[in-house]
Amino acid sequence: MPPPAPPTELVPSERAVVLLSCVLSALGSGLLMATHALWPDLRSQARRLLLFLSLADLLSAASYFYGVLQDFKDSSWDCVLQGALSTFANTSSFFWTVAIALYLYLSIVSTARGPETGRLLWAFHVVSWGVPLAITVAAVALKKIGYDASDVSVGWCWINLQAEDRVLWMLLTGKLWELLAYVTLPVLYLLIRKHIHRAHEELSEYRPIVSTEAHQLQRRTSVADKKLVLIPLIFICLRVWSTVRFVLTLCGSPAVRMPVLVVLHGIGNTFQGGANCIMFVFCTRAVRTRLLSLCCCCSPQPPAAAAESPAGPPKAPALSKTGESQRPRRTPNELPST
């Protein structure tokens, strides 16, 4: 491997952008955890896994925020501590992201239920927390975590570039799992999407679907299709810049210090919690509706008397010749959805 490139200097504007990304990611992870606490009926197994992913993303955003704010210049004790926390949280986030995809695949395609699901969740906890913890403890004990000149980070500490086996430890503490996630996530979500389409076609063949029901089913399938495509796509778009700078560092290329790559790397590594919040809160109708209702309830309401007309209380709707109310009727599509 060529000698390390000169340190990458962070200008204030780049640091500000990455710090903002950390804050937004922390807020997004916090909002995801808040929705889990507020509405127990939404606590499905998949969203419970999403809760643990949010915990990992929150810890990751907090540790990255401290690292970018400090902009370390050597392997001080807080550099090692920050590097250890971010390594553990970031690697755990990879494992939980793949765990959610694997759980959805086994639940939808393989129809895993009951005791099998319980054992699977315990396995996810052991692997997604245990493996990153073991790797991080080993890296700290062997003094592999330290100052990296921001060539494979954006101000925070990771693997010490002075270590002779730094490439091996870069792979073990993140890059290997990141590369595996690039392959695993698209494959699993495409298999789920294919299974849903096949099941929908079989259902249409054996049971005639009325137009209203067909429209609703088509809309829900379209939303599911978009999410199943966007989830791995967003993950790859966020993380690929880190991989690009990793490869450039291995090659000793000066392009690793390009400001655009530095900013994209900083946002990609720190904004995972914010992206998950957008996908699973703001783009999920059931959660978004409740969140909007909660915000409306918290806003000040006008007095009841002010809502009435100056001429007095509102009158009952007039009746037509057939004795029916003139209120507008709801179509089936306008009825409250379950």
Image: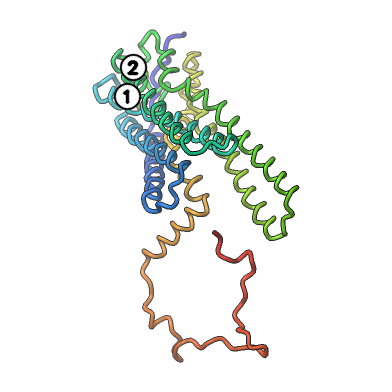
What number is the disc on residue 232? none
Describe the element under mark 2 as helix, strand or loop.
helix
Q: Amino acid at mark 1?
A: Ala
Image location of residue 143, percent across then percent down: 30, 14
Look at 43% across and 56% down and name the residue there.
291
Q: Which quarter of the figure is the C terminus placed in?
A: bottom right
Q: With 142 as the anchor, is 190 left or right in this view?
A: right
Q: Amino acid at mark 2?
A: Ala
Please give the residue where the numbered disc 2 appears in the rendered image: 139
Q: With 269 as the anchor, is 112 left or right in this view?
A: right
Image location of residue 112, percent across then percent down: 53, 36
Look at 30% across and 18% down and name the residue there.
140
Q: Nearer the viewer, residue 207 or 230?
A: 207
> In this picture, is 304 found above or below 30?
below
Look at 58% across and 32% down and name the residue there.
188
Please give the residue where the numbered disc 1 appears in the rendered image: 84
- Among the 4 quarters of the image, the one containing residue 209: bottom right
> In this picture, is 225 found above or below 315?
above
Q: How many marks?
A: 2
Describe the element under mark 1 as helix, strand or loop.
helix
Mark 2 or mark 1, earlier in chain: 1
Q: With 197 as the anchor, is 146 left or right in this view?
A: left
